[in-house]
Amino acid sequence: MKDIPNFDPQFIPMESDNSLFNQNTNKQAFKFFFESYYTSFCLFANKYLKDPAVSQDIVQDAFLYLWNKSDDFNSESSAKSYLYKYIKDRSLNYLRDRELRQKIELEKMKSEIFLRDNLIEEETYSIIFDAIRVLPPQAQRVIELSLDGLKNQEIAEELSISINTVKTIKLRAYASLRLELKENIFILFMLHFASSRFI
């Protein structure tokens, strides 16, 4: 569990005397309450979520919500009870929403369209990388770095060559690849897009 985040009472507006954190003590009292229970509430949330980062986010939201509703609480025990319920409900809602997202994703993965698209993509990558492997070693390395997202300057630094050399190698390599892959129009289009992007 991470350390308790810095809570600065300077940024909290003053509330009425009827609240648990009244005008005379509200900022410091709330800060003390926050620091006293933050870790415990995070551990409580994490019992449901098994995710410390999400637990901390929910607990911090809970404290913010408590502050905005502080007029409704006149004792520490009522504030704690409210926070436990708020955190439990938010945690269960998060799990429900995550389960729904996973279910939707699973249904998508079961579809024939998903299977078809993945097969096409895998076959496409296989053909592309087979063609890249027949390039000269330096050209092969330049193209691989380019497809990994490196810019020309970064490739030049990685291979200790000039940026102009990188551009020349790429032009020749893409020309060779176009010839190698001339029978596959879709791959030709992909390479044309890649060359216009990375050169």
Image: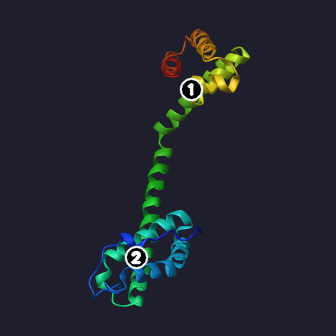
- Nearer to us in this view, 1 or 182: 1
Residue named by callout 1: 151
10 Å crowding of disc 1: few (<14), some (14-19), many (20+): some
Q: Amino acid at mark 2?
A: Tyr
Report if residue 100 is visible in the image: yes
Task: Identify the element where label 2 is drawn.
Answer: helix
Q: Position of residue 139 (x, y in %)?
A: 67, 16
| Inter-mark Cα distance, 1 to 2 | 48 Å
Helix, strand or loop at mark 1:
loop
Residue 167: give x, y in percent of width and height.
Answer: 58, 15
Which of the two residues, 19 or 41, is positioned nearer the viewer here?
19
Three-letter amino acid code of the residue under disc 1: Lys
Q: Is residue 132 above or below residue 110?
A: above
Residue appearing at x 60%, y 13% in the figure: 164
- Tell whether 68 sits left or right of 43: left
Number of disc labels: 2
Residue at left offset 36%, top offset 77%:
66
Residue occupying image coordinates x 66% and y 25%: 157
User: Where is mark 2, residue-wise?
Assistant: 86
Res 23 quadrant in image = bottom left
Q: Which of 10/94 is in front?
A: 10
Please name whichever residue, 47 or 38, is drawn nearer the observer in this view of the structure.
Answer: 38
Q: Looking at the image, which residue is at 58% across and 8% down?
A: 179
